[in-house]
Amino acid sequence: MSSLQPRKEHKFTFGLWTVGNPGRDPFGEPTREPLSPVTIVKRLSELGAYGVNFHDNDLVPIDASATERDRIVAEFRTALDDYGLCVPMATTNLFSDPAFKDGAYTSNDPRVRMYAVQKTMRAMDLGAEFGAKVYVFWGGREGAEVDGAKDAREALKWFREALNFLCEYSISQGYGYRFALEAKPNEPRGDIYLPTTGAYLGFIPTLDHPDMVGVNPEVGHEQMAGLNFYHVIAQAIEAGKLFHIDLNDQKGCRFDQDLRFGSESIKNMFFLVKLLEESGYEGSRHFDAHAYRSEDPEGVWDFAAGCMRTYLIYREKARQFNDDPDIQALLAEIRSTEPGFEQIPLEFTPERAEQIKNLPLDRRELAKKRLPYERLDQLIIDLLMGVR
């Protein structure tokens, strides 16, 4: 089907660290040779992707000289121009280097905190060179294994100070970044501060520039906490804070697996795609996932193509859902109310309060309304399994 062919307007993006993952895990060495950024750009363009994102050190090694940096940046820019890809988002690696073993912005050591801010400013400069407008913050080391070693209140204060400073830096440089905060409950830290998207939505209003800070929810990270990702994204959209999104999949509340998008949580990911497509979300659909460790280099591109294809399958299924007369008839029944009853807006006035108090609402009658959720859910299963 032509509708399953990825195109630039779908805004599918991958990170250099995703398709570039060499198959390493905590218990095993790499199973694939590293891919160069130029090769990644070329192959993603051939598959129909829109853009490619990076941590600073995905592109420029942490110990690269100024000359090496300039060469790498020039080669990458040429590849982007040659193959028609853009860089919508950039971020900083504040978790790999041993300097961050006890946190970056939340380290007990102020020297580490200053280094983290310094490294981020330089990475923001790099992202801005390529036109990135979203800047993601994932605090993989911002947490604790030993609560007695760090005052969590102080850690949150340090994190807030860093974000406030970096917001001002972006403004002063004219970068126009929107900051997107990415939550995760644990791993690599035993516990990570601000572990869910909901926690970040509560934290953002305490910042000096809450208007320029939103969230970057990741499927697997919220599922690690046992949460419904569709609900998480609905809340972020309703709050006007969905600045970016990381798509992958996960087998329940386990370690972070970064599986191919939609490969496990089929029904939940269907409703996620339906929400993204119908809500007016205009950002990237970023796949933060990895090919199975068993794959050879060519299997990496099967993985990348599969992420995009599955998203487009769900997109098509969302259209079928909206056009299905049986599903829509059930929804109309479920959402119906007593004829002639007009919903009263909950905008308080003393008169409206008195009006609501006097409404003839019989709880026994309300409880009798039929809600055919079993039939509805089975129709959705039939639709997703391709028998409707």
Image (cartoon, helix red, strand yellow):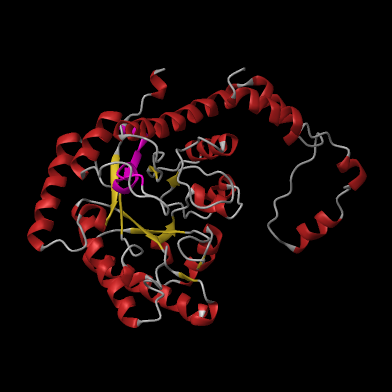
Q: In the picture, which quadrant includes the C terminus?
A: top right
- Position of residue 254 relative to residue 372, above or below, is below
Q: Is residue 22 left or right of residue 331?
A: left
Magenta stretch: includes residue 295? no
Camera sees residue 174? no
Q: Give residue 163's position: percent from left, percent from top.
A: 37, 70
- Position of residue 22 relative to residue 374, above or below, is below
Magenta part of the chain: 8-23
Camera sees residue 237? yes
- Position of residue 17 relative to residue 123, above or below, is above
- Position of residue 381 relative to residue 202, above or below, is above
Q: Give residue 217's position: percent from left, percent from top.
A: 47, 52
Magenta stretch: includes residue 18? yes
Q: Residue furthest left?
A: 67
Q: Nearer the viewer, residue 276 or 194?
A: 194
Q: In the picture, which quadrant includes the N terminus?
A: top left
Q: Residue at x 28, y 58 (%)?
A: 176
Instruction: Please tell me how many numbered marks the rendered image carries.
Output: 0
In terms of image quadrants, where is residue 4?
top left
Q: Is residue 210 left or right of residue 345?
A: left
Q: Give residue 60's position: percent from left, percent from top.
A: 19, 56
Q: Give residue 321's position: percent from left, percent from top.
A: 59, 26
Q: Nearer the viewer, residue 317 or 307?
A: 307
